[in-house]
Image (cartoon, grey):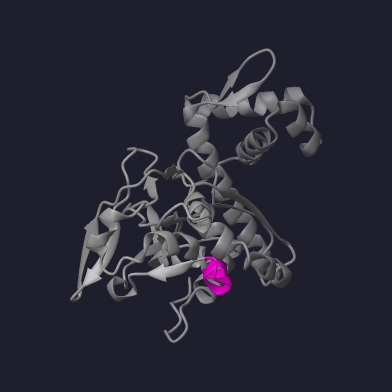
Amino acid sequence: MARQFSDLQLGSLELFCLAVEHNSFTAAAQVAGLTPAAVSRGIARLEQRLGNRLFIRTTRQIRLSEAGRSYYRECRAALQQLGEAERQLAGQQLQPSGLLRLSLPTSYGERRILPLLPRLQQRYPQLQLELQLSNHNIDFTRDDFDLAIRARAQPDSSLIARKLEDAELVVVAAPDYLARHGTPQTPEELVAHQCIRFLLPRTGRSVPWSFRRDGQEFELQPDGHFACSDDLQAGVSLARHAGGLYQCYRFMVEDELRSGQLRTLLDDFGGCSRPFSLIYPQQRQPSLRLRVLVDFLLTELTPIGKAPLPRLD
């Protein structure tokens, strides 16, 4: 196999990644033990080789170009894989280390994932986790994340999707609300009640409520004075204070159901659920830290009574 990269070119890749991560040629030079001019020359050589500008430079700052953003993600993954290979040969691969960046939906992240992560970090003390809680989907080609968890993950050939669980949907209300307005016995009776709506951020449309009758799932579009967007948990707060009925995931209201602040309704028409999946980019050899995180979540979130999901090899 002919050489594709000289030692100088590989060094330029490392300097490029350092400049991105520290957002400064000067800071990258300090970390690398070089002068800022040497870092600038190395990155200029890289840009000349690629025929693309990686940074947009001004007198006060640098920022990645679109080409630079895409190239950084590939370089970072390649350098990480080289590091993993060296650690494996050196016998250090048994202990995963380094940074993982996760994007999590707000409610699912807070209720299902965050309580588990301290145990993962105790098991692997050299692992670092940076968490973003947001209901906006990330773009792996643009945003620098290792893994995301999303409801109803969309098919994408460039991503691997692993289902974590099917989260059960329930309709809840506060006892005070039910005492004043009565308890609906069928989904069709929801027209006589205040139903707290959740609006999809992208479209502004209300999410329909899902029910099951005679083994068939169907949807209704309830109405009410309150509508929330972006954060599902806002509807739980409104329901807890007698603002109306609300359909949400059971994991969001476990504490309130246990304490009696909320009650479930229309249980005879329940049984609907929505899948939550973890997604991450296709890689020839996922890093050890990503593998242990994926295996940990798949194991910890396996429903009781079901066989464990296959491990990430």
Left or right: 155 with respect to 177? Answer: left
Instruction: Give percent across and percent down for residue 39.
Output: 71, 28
Residue 117 position, x and y percent, is 64, 65
Q: Quadrant of residue 126?
A: bottom right
x and y percentages locating residue 291 in the rendered image? 55, 66
> Outermost residue toward the top?
59
Q: What stretch is highlighted in magenta?
A: 254-261
Q: Which of 145 and 49 is in front in this view?
A: 145
Residue 234 appears anywhere in the view: yes
Query: Residue drawn 48% across and 25% down?
Result: 52
Q: Which of 249 and 24 is in front in this view?
A: 249
The number of numbered badges drawn on the structure is 0
Residue 175 % position (x, y): 48, 65
Q: Can residue 44 be seen in this view?
A: no
For image coordinates 81% across by 33% down, the residue present is: 30
Q: Is residue 289 left or right of residue 208?
A: right
The residue shown at (52%, 31%) is: 68
**Magenta span contains residue 256:** yes
Q: Nearer the viewer, residue 289 or 164?
A: 164
Q: Does the magenta stretch include residue 44?
A: no
Q: Quadrant of residue 141?
A: top left
Q: Residue at x 39, y 54 (%)?
A: 159
Residue extending farthest to the bottom is 305
